[in-house]
Amino acid sequence: MAAAGFDERVDIALTVNGESVEARVPAGRHLVDFLRLDLGLTGAHAGCEHGVCGACTLQVDGEIVRGCLVLAAQLHGAEVWTLEGVSETGVMRDLQAAFVARNALQCGFCTPGMLFAAHDILSEGNVPAREAIREHISGNYCRCTGYEAIVDAIEETARARAGQGAKEPVE
């Protein structure tokens, strides 16, 4: 069987945010575009389209991926979670509340990627050092916040989940 051409359509069946989805997509359509254009799920943003900025970050089969680097046609049988879906489950509710409280989301363009990266490091179950948080979110560009509020929100959520409470301010 010959490989599908870029404009040829491919049938896929996958799970998106817990719901079965069947679609016929152009072989060259990226996951982020499939979600936004075909399914109306606009939480992930198409930013640099080179996998550098992190705005298109999603979860596929339990791993965070760049939606601009994955073709929808590659995901037959996969489980995909977007920010909309994860938000509905409530699994990130405390993290999202910390982002709001710390003003860690200003324009919101980087927020989906930042939240997925934060959720990923927090899933390890410990309180990561601030340097580890910075390293883990380093693949997500933010032009508004200067990152401190984002790191604060992630650290605050990790401490709360560990029952440690807020960190004492440095004088």
Image (spheres, rainbow, N blue to C red):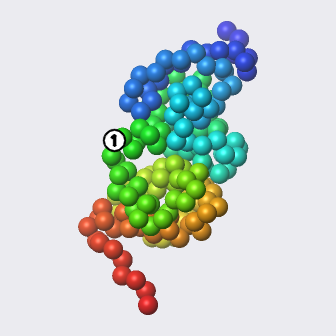
* Quadrant into which the N terminus falls: top right
When the figure is inspected, residue 14 is found, relative to residue 127, above or below; the finding is: above
* Badge 1 amino acid: Thr
**Displayed quadrant of residue 49:** top right
Check the image and name the residue furthest to the top. Answer: 1
Q: Residue at x 45, y 30 (%)?
A: 16
Check the image and name the residue furthest to the left. Answer: 163
How many callouts does the rendering have? 1
- The reply, left or right, for residue 44 in relation to residue 84 is right
Please rate how many residues cluster around mark 1, counting C-alpha atoms within 10 Å: few if below 14, some from 14 to 19, many from 20: few
Q: Nearer the viewer, residue 1 or 106?
A: 106
Residue 121 % position (x, y): 44, 56
Residue 2 % position (x, y): 71, 11
Q: Residue at x 61, y 59 (%)?
A: 142
Q: Nearer the viewer, residue 70 or 108?
A: 108
Residue 80 % position (x, y): 47, 33
- The reply, left or right, for residue 136 in relation to residue 141 is left
When the figure is inspected, residue 113 is found, relative to residue 100, above or below; the finding is: above
Check the image and name the residue furthest to the front. Answer: 107
Q: Is residue 162 visible?
A: yes
Q: Residue at x 60, y 28 (%)?
A: 37
**Displayed quadrant of residue 3:** top right
Q: Is residue 74 visible?
A: no
Residue 27 % position (x, y): 66, 21
When the figure is inspected, residue 169 is found, relative to residue 116, above or below; the finding is: below
For disc 1, the marked residue is 89
Tag 1's secondary structure? helix
When the figure is inspected, residue 7 is found, relative to residue 72, above or below; the finding is: above
Q: Residue at x 41, y 38 (%)?
A: 85
